[in-house]
Image (spheres, rainbow, N blue to C red):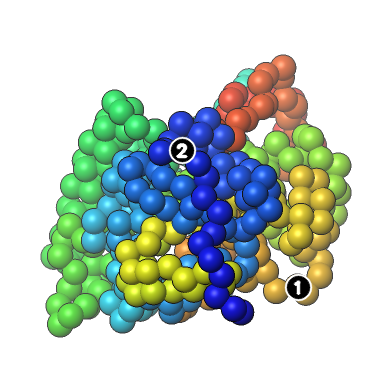
Amino acid sequence: MARRTAPPRVPGYSANAALLREGYAFISGRCDALGTDIFVTRLVGRRVVCCRGPEAARLLYSDAPLTRRGALPNSVLHLLQDEGSGQLLDGEEHSERKAMFLPLLDGAAVRSFSATLEQEWQAVLADWDVGSRIRLYDAANHALGRAALAWCGVPTSPAETTRLIRELVEMVDQAGTVGPRNWRARQHRQHAEGWAGERIDGARRRGPTGNGTSVLDRIAQHQEGGGRLPTEVAAVELLNVLRPLVANARFVVFAALALETHKDAVKAVRSGDPERLLHFAQEVRRFYPFFPMVGAVTTAPVELQGYEFGTGTWLLFDLYGTNHDDRLWPQPYRFRPRRFETTADHTYTLVPQGAGEHASSHRCPGENLTLAAVTTSIRCLSQVSYHLPVQDLGYTLNRMPALPRSGLLLDRVADHP
C-alpha cells in the first residue's frame, strides 16, 4: 500500500469530555463521521491514534514493535492489571510469562471450571426460594467468585471469600471512573494484592499439592529469569486470573437479558444443542458492551492503513466498534446467534477480549473460560422458572464497563420451568 499523508484529525485540544459523554461509541462514531477507520485526537493530554477493524487488530495483536506499557491511564491500569502483570511485558518476557497461563486453554481445565461453577450455581439456586427475588448480577458475582477461588485452589474462609469477591467486583466496576470512587477501589486492590501475596507465600512454604497443577501452585512455582516470581508480582498475576473470571458476571447478566429481549436467543438456548448454546454465548460477547478499547505504544515506526507512525505513538483500538462494524457483521445491532454457524475465521473480527492467537499474542487466555461461564450459568438458570419484575433494564454506552441499571432482578416462580 502506498504511503499516505497524515490521517484525519479531530479538531480541538482535548476529546476527554467527548469520550466520557459517548463512551463505547466514541471511536466508531468519529470514524463513521470522517469516513475512515483511523483518526488522530488528544486524550488526557496526549496525542492518540484511534483505530478500528481487522487491520488494526492484526497490528496490535502481532509481533509488531509495540508495548502495553504506558498505553492505559493509571486509573485503569492499577485496577485491571497493575505493575508486574504479564500484559505489560514484551517479546520473550511476555512469552515466558504467558506460558504460565496457557494451560487455562486446555479442554480439561475448562471442563473442570464448568463443573465447579455448576456446583456453585446449584448452591445459589438452592438458597433462592420460590416467591423470592434475586439480583442476578450479585448472584453471578457470588457464584463466579466462589468457583474461581475453588478452581484456582486458593484456600479462603467464608469472610475472606465475601470480602475478596467484593474487592474483585469493585476493580471491574470502577475501572472506568476517576476520582474518589477509583481511589477507593485502588485501595481495595492493594488490600487484595496483600491477601494474594499471603496465599502465594503459603503455597511456597507447603509446596505443591496433589499434582501441583492448580492455578495457585502454577503461579507460586513459576520460574522466570532463573528464579520464582517476586511475591508481589505473583500476587498480581493471581488476581489477574480471579478478577477476569468474576468479571464474566456481566456477560451472564447480558445473556439473561438477551433471553428476555431477543427471540433468536431463546431458540438457541432451548434447542438443547451445545453448539447452538456456544453460538449464543459468542453472540452475547459480540453484541453487548464489555470493555470498550485497548491500547498500545509503538517502540519503533509502524505502518497502519498506509500511514506511518513513529516511535512512541499511542494507539487505541476500538473493541466495541469493531464488533459492531456492518462491513464485518451484517445487521450488527440485531442479536443473531446463527451468524456463528459459519466456519468464518473471527480471529481479528470478534474482539470483545482482544484479537490474535492466544499462544503468541496479548490476547486474553481466558476466553474459553468466559464461554464456559456463560453457557454453564445459562444452563443452570434454565433449571428454574423465573420472571422479570418491572425494572429498568436499560444500559448506557457512557458507563464503562456497561451493565443494566437494575442488575437484572429475577422473581423465582417455581422449581422447574
* Left or right: 190 as drawn, with respect to 249: left
In the rendering, at what x and y percent does residue 205 appear?
Answer: 13, 65
* 3D distance between C-alphas at marks 1 and 2: 40 Å
Q: Measuring from the top left, give residue 304's x and y in whole percent.
A: 53, 70
On the question of residue 151 being in view, the answer is no
Q: Residue at x 81, y 66 (%)?
A: 341
- The residue tagged 2 is 12
Q: Which part of the image, by quadrant, shows the N terminus?
A: bottom right
User: Which residue is found at the position 63% from the left and 43% from the top?
Assistant: 29
Relative to 184, 398 lies left or right: right
User: In terms of depth relative to the viewer, which is nearer, 107 or 290?
Assistant: 290
- Against 131, residue 241 (above or below) is below
Q: Which mark is residue 180?
A: none
Q: Can residue 4 be seen by looking at this rendering?
A: yes
Amino acid type at mark 1:
Ala
Question: Which element carries disc 1, helix, strand or loop?
Answer: loop
Up/down of 110 relative to 257, above or below: below
Residue 132 vs residue 38, the one in the foreground: 38
Q: State the residue position of label 1.
A: 344
Q: Nearer the viewer, mark 1 or mark 2?
A: 2
Q: Looking at this view, is 46 or 194 the one in front? A: 46
**Image location of residue 230, percent across then percent down:** 15, 65
